[in-house]
Image: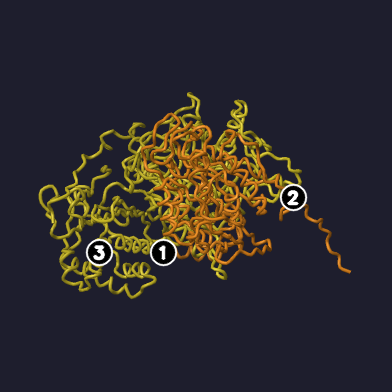
Chain colours: A orange, B yellow
């Protein structure tokens, strides 16, 4: 007779790694009531729970600012690193190189991303580090009380009435230009869109950029602002309805012919994009994605959904030809040349 | 340049293996290979050499000087002035000729005017039509520029009496991978040699002869090469850098070593990531991120890069993350003299970043120490959980130095206080990231990826308590900062100890880094003039107790700094009570490698063993930049 181990039937509230949704929560938020960032935190909790992220494998990275406080508000059983302003990408790069088994998720704001850390953002994308980069984008510096950021739209008005005179930096447009392999935009209030995008980002094998418009209730939610709740809701043009089909679940859904397309993600999961408009955007078409972003900006609209994806691009660890085993685990015998090799090298340097 | 001794031209007593040869050429003309051939030939004859390349921040067209110090004692520092000059740069012709020590010799392009100030009656001239010889005899237009330089190798070999087969041997070593090039180069070498044999009789006294007992078994390599090898042997797995002179070759050599020794022959996988970052901010950020995640990580840079790394260094200090920064110092402030040497970053690196910070610095003086400290830095950084600097300089990093072969490391890595999942289980999860359990100021850490529910903690540069929770409480802040400060005291017993020569003399010299080589020669010269000195070579900050005891026990301690502001002198002074402070500063900061004269001049004068006149600087000679062709 063969003993089969007795496993309790999974309770309805446990995910595939046997954790409840509460296990994905963090400390209580210290952000303002109604802050878009808090909504994003809730989406992260839900998405990570549903995806079955293993907390000990998650590394939560952030820069400085309101958004960068967020990593303390989710998955308290994961290591987190609130670094310096605009430098989350380099910290993430180092962490991932040291241990490529880590699932690296960075949360930064528009100050981090489009101003002080613009260089690091650009080069993170060029390297295609396998990580999720969430930009909680509200167009203002909240912690320093309401100065414009570089993602504020031209003509958008500050709380005191001063209009922004300078051209906006579109972090999605820039990401595509720089060769990003996954670029999506969404709105903090749209859980139906943010949650599947987050899961798809986790499944992606490179830098996944998620620009989430996240209104600042205290400094940028007034009339004349183009990042207020009212304005964003009014001007949000959704590209697709999204269904995330994880690799670990066997879900068969029939969709009527011609109404949807499907993207196979790096980890074997699928993202199904259901058409909303008849001439649907092809997210594998880089030029089309750039055109879409430029046109939307001209019209003062936000296009949200999956803007661009190339699931096959090599990530940094692959390009560096790193072993799967974390570099940090190698010991003397793996890292030092042998005594014979060393002596031969010494002889090379002698006369 | 300072004239230490005068040698009249008439005194033709041969001077064997004890002089300085200088090649004055134009950057970008390929003269470096020729200079290395001469260096290697001398080395192969058993003669101790100390090559110093003084070069401009330029790819092509500006003046460059290559000095080879030759001495039977094996002195490794610059001697000051040239005895034998090879002049191949019309722009510096006048200054170069006037810089030759009395009694010396000049081998020069035949069309340079020997007239007016350049016509000296105390030196010998050997004019060689290098350009014409090249034009008339080298058919291969592609190689003419390069091969023309080999003509001067022949003339120099004739003048110094280096046998041609030694030159050929050096060429064979230079062209290990391309033996067919040797004969082609030798043809040019013979042109220069034969011309001199035909036209001149040697009238200067400087020559070389084979010798033994000094260089046998010794290696010749650059400090950056040695440092890179140390970093490799030290188990570094993540390195990030941004190109900057004079440190670029550290990571370039590291890449070469990693490709040779870290690639799994079966899979092709490489056990090291070397990232050329977008700037020094990102380079140090990558190293901090990797150190946080548990890898041995480093970045290498020079002064301007150190300035950019200040912010992250403060984070690594306060969040207590192992970090190794290799600083190959160059002359600052600002862009300064990017290709000239200095010890100018000592006080800046020591307290790099805002707020209260204090970091250990390792101060290598030799290529062997560059290799050893390249390894030790990782043990220290992981043990102390914070930034550790290896403070090399351009002189050490980019010049060739003689050294005994390095020792294969016998000790395992010290990975510091890291709690594993098993440790946490044993502790029943009761631990705090910033608790001082052992009383040495060093807390325990866990690495991301540790599979235990109690493993995680939140890392931040903001105020935090012993359990890594955010805190702005005044008493918490003060307690945590005080505890981190304790690690600096702990480091005194962990850093490489000073090397002391204490014979109970009243007068002592304290030096660090590359000043060592000038001090060695200066002490010999001073002893010959009746001034015996004790010597302490400090190899790290913080000062070890031994070092402080040495300083307290001497009547006068001359502290040698290669910077204007007496940086190490000032740091040392802070550790002494006023009544213990018998320090006198000796400085050198003109960008050139320090010479023995720069050390002994001020000391002999202060000790009443020489008059100030003896060491007065000769008036500078202006560089003529146009008008001669």
Residue placed most toward the observer, A196 or A337: A196
Report how far apart the C-alphas of labels 1 and 2 lie in the structure: 72 Å
The subunit carrying tag 2 is A
* Quarter of the figure with the N terminus of chain B: top left
- Decide which of B172, B626 is in the foreground and name it: B626
Please name the residue shown 57% across and 51% down the image: A193
Q: Is residue A243 visible?
A: yes
Residue B149 is tagged as 3
What crowding class fits label 3: few (fewer than 14 Cα within 10 Å), some (14-19), or many (20 or more)? many
Q: Residues within 10 Å of mark 1 (few under 14, many from 20)?
A: some
Q: Report the number of discs.
A: 3
Between disc 1 and disc 2, whose residue precedes? 2
From mark 3 to mark 2, how far is it between C-alphas? 80 Å
Relative vertical location of residue A24 with respect to residue B135 in this rendering, above or below: above
Image location (x, y in percent) of residue B318: 55, 37
The Cα atoms of the two marked residues, 1 and 3, are separated by: 22 Å
Q: Secondary structure at mark 2?
A: loop
Using the rendered view, name the quadrant where residue A263 is placed.
bottom right
Q: In the rendering, which numbered label is found on residue B154?
A: none
Rendering quarter of residue A74 = top right
- Asked if residue A343 lies left or right of residue A288, the reply is right
Which residue position holds label 2?
Answer: A13
Dot 1: what SS? loop
Residue on which the image places disc 1:
A351
Q: Are marks 1 and 3 on the same chain?
A: no
């Amino acid at each position: 007779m063969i003993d089969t181990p007795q496993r309790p039937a999974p309770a309805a509230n446990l995910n595939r790694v046997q954790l409840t949704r509460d296990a994905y929560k963090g400390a209580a938020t210290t952000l303002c009531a109604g802050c878009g960032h808090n909504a994003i935190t809730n989406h992260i909790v839900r998405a990570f729970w549903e995806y079955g992220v293993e907390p000990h494998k998650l590394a939560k990275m952030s820069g400085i600012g309101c958004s960068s406080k967020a990593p303390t508000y989710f998955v308290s059983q994961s290591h987190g690193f609130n670094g310096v302003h605009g430098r989350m990408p380099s910290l993430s790069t180092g962490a991932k190189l040291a241990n490529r088994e880590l699932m690296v998720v960075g949360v930064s704001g528009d100050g981090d991303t489009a101003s002080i850390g613009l260089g690091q953002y650009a080069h993170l994308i060029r390297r295609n580090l396998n990580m999720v980069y969430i930009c909680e984008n509200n167009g203002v510096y909240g912690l320093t009380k309401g100065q414009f950021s570089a993602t504020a739209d031209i003509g958008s008005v500050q709380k005191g009435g001063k209009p922004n005179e300078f051209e906006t930096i579109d972090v999605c447009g820039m990401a595509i230009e720089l060769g990003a392999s996954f670029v999506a935009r969404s709105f903090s209030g749209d859980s139906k869109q943010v949650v599947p995008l987050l899961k798809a980002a986790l499944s992606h094998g490179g830098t996944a950029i998620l620009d989430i418009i996240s209104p600042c209730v205290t400094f940028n939610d007034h009339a004349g602002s183009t990042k207020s709740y009212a304005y964003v809701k009014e001007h949000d043009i959704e590209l697709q309805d999204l269904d995330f089909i994880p690799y670990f679940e066997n879900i068969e859904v029939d969709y009527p012919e011609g109404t949807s397309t499907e993207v196979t993600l790096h980890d074997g999961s699928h993202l199904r994009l259901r058409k909303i408009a008849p001439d649907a955007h092809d997210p594998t078409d880089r030029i089309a994605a750039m055109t879409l972003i430029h046109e939307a900006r001209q019209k003062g609209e936000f296009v949200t959904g999956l803007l661009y994806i190339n699931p096959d691009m090599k990530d940094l660890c692959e390009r560096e030809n790193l072993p799967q085993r974390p570099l940090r685990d190698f010991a003397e015998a793996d890292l030092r040349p042998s005594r014979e090799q060393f002596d031969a090298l010494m002889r090379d340097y002698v006369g | 340049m300072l004239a230490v001794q005068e040698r009249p031209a008439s005194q033709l007593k041969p001077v064997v293996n004890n002089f300085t040869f200088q090649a004055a050429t134009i950057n970008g003309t390929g003269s470096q290979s020729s200079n290395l051939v001469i260096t290697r030939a001398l080395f192969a004859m058993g003669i101790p050499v100390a090559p110093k390349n003084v070069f401009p921040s330029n790819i092509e067209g500006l003046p460059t000087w290559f000095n080879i110090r030759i001495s039977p004692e094996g002195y490794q520092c610059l001697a000051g002035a040239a005895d034998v000059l090879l002049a191949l740069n019309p722009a510096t012709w006048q200054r170069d000729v006037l810089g030759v020590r009395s009694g010396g010799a000049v081998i020069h392009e035949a069309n340079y005017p020997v007239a007016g100030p350049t016509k000296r009656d105390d030196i010998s001239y050997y004019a060689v039509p290098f350009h014409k010889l090249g034009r008339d005899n080298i058919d291969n237009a592609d190689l003419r520029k390069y091969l023309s330089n080999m003509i001067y190798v022949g003339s120099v070999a004739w003048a110094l009496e280096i046998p041609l087969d030694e030159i050929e041997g050096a060429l064979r070593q230079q062209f290990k991978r391309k033996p067919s090039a040797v004969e082609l180069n030798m043809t040019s070498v013979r042109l220069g040699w034969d011309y001199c044999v035909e036209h001149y009789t040697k009238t200067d006294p400087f020559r070389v002869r084979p010798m033994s007992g000094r260089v046998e078994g010794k290696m010749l390599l650059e400090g950056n090469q040695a440092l890179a090898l140390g970093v490799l042997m030290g188990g570094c797995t993540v390195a990030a850098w941004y190109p900057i002179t004079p440190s670029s070759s550290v990571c370039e050599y590291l890449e070469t070593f990693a490709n040779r020794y870290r690639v799994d022959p079966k899979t092709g996988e490489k056990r090291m990531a070397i990232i050329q970052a977008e700037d020094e901010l990102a380079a140090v950020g990558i190293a901090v991120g990797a150190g946080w995640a548990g890898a041995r990580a480093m970045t290498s840079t020079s002064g301007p890069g150190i300035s950019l790394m200040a912010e992250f260094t403060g984070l690594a200090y306060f969040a207590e993350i192992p970090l190794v920064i290799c600083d190959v110092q160059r002359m600052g402030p600002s862009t300064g003299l990017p290709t000239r040497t200095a010890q100018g970053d000592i006080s800046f690196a020591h307290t790099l970043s805002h707020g209260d910070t204090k970091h250990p610095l390792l101060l290598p003086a030799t290529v062997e120490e560059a290799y050893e400290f390249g390894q030790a830095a990782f043990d220290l950084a992981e043990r102390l959980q914070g930034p550790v600097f290896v403070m090399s300089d351009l002189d050490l990093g980019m010049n060739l130095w003689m050294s005994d072969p390095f020792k294969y490391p016998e000790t395992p890595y010290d990975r510091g206080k890291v709690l594993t999942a098993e440790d946490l289980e044993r502790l029943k999860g009761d631990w705090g990231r910033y608790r001082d359990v052992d009383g040495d100021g060093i807390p325990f850490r866990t690495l991301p990826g540790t599979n235990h529910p109690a493993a995680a903690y939140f890392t931040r540069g903001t105020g935090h308590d012993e359990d890594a929770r955010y805190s702005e409480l005044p008493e918490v802040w003060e307690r945590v900062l005080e505890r981190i400060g304790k690690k600096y005291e702990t480091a005194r017993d962990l850093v490489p100890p000073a090397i002391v020569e204490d014979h109970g003399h009243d007068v002592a010299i304290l030096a660090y880094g590359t000043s060592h080589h000038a001090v060695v020669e200066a002490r010999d010269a001073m002893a010959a003039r009746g001034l015996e000195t004790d010597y302490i070579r400090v190899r790290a900050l913080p000062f070890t107790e031994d070092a402080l005891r040495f300083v307290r026990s001497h009547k006068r301690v001359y502290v040698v700094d290669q910077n204007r502001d007496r940086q190490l002198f000032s740091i040392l002074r802070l550790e002494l009570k006023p009544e213990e402070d018998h320090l006198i500063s000796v400085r050198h900061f003109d960008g050139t490698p320090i010479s023995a004269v720069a050390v002994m001049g001020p000391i002999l004068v202060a000790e009443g063993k020489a008059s100030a006149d003896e060491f007065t600087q000769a008036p500078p000679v202006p560089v003529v930049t146009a008008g001669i062709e």
